[in-house]
Amino acid sequence: MSYTIKIQQIEHINHNVIRMVTDKPANYSFKSGQATNLAINKEGLASKKRPFTFTSLPEDETLEFIIKIYPSHNGVTAQIEKLVVGDELIIEAAWGAITYKGEGAFIAGGAGITPFIAILRDLSRKGALEGHKLFFSVNEKKDILLEHNLEVWLADNLHLTLSDEDCDAYDYGYIDTSFLKSKNLNPTNPVYLCGPPDMMDAVKASLYELGVSKSLIVTEA
């Protein structure tokens, strides 16, 4: 089943990421961390569905998406950047395996932070953030999303690392075995993982090395 929704707000939140708020279909439901297939309701684009994660909460009256734009790909995200308030989108039912399974660590690379924004926002609203950690890797400081929110939510349990820029106040390098060990990752708790495929493969290898059971890794792939 598909639903047509209208854009209420659309804005850049950094150099290549857009925040988009839309109306919400009646009785539409999803879990924090889940996604939907989305298309632009315009000629030539309505059949081009792509997966995007909800960053709003299930009980919110509107839907929110935070979307990284890839202009060089000349694909759907490049078209999203051209949209304005009042334009229509098409979404389907929600899906996704990344949902909350209990206290643990979130590991994100780049736009892979989006399902965790919703889960952390939900935990914050419930006053249940204590004990959770977030490991978030991006290329450069300008690529960090919602840094202030993450700092407020997680304080000393927020671990940001830059892979392409050596900058004061941030760790430099990749999320690997030694990095996770130095930040006291608990291998007996769930680990939520989302990011580019190569990054996820490398992190999974590190998690196994640290003794994390495959059954504790929550990911789409």
Image (tube, rainbow, N blue to C red):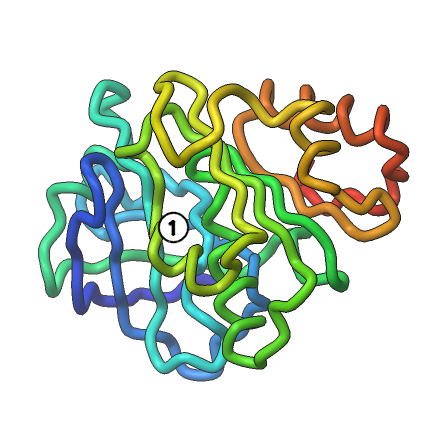
Question: In this view of the protein, which residue sits in the foreground, 101 or 133?
Answer: 133
Q: State left or right for residue 89 relative to residue 179.
A: left
Bin the neighbour count of mark 1 within 10 Å (Cα to Cα): few under 14, some 14-19, many 20 and up: many
Q: State left or right for residue 131 relative to residue 63.
A: right
Question: Quick check: 201 above or below 156?
Answer: above
Q: State left or right for residue 27 relative to residue 82.
A: right
Question: In this view of the protein, which residue sits in the foreground, 124 or 156?
Answer: 156
Question: Quick check: 162 above or below 159?
Answer: above
Q: Position of residue 158 (x, y in %)?
A: 53, 49
Query: Residue at left 90%, top 33%?
Result: 211
Q: Position of residue 145 (x, y in %)?
A: 35, 46
Question: In this view of the protein, which residue sits in the foreground, 202 or 162?
Answer: 162
Query: Residue at left 84%, top 43%?
Result: 187
Quadrant in the picture for residue 14: top left
Query: Residue at left 54%, top 61%?
Result: 94
Question: Quick check: 214 above or below 73?
Answer: below
Dot 1 amino acid type: Leu
Question: Quick check: 115 above or below 206?
Answer: below
Residue to which mark 1 is pinned: 38
Q: Position of residue 87 (x, y in %)?
A: 14, 59
Find numbered disc 1 in the image and state the secondary structure of the residue it sits on. Answer: strand
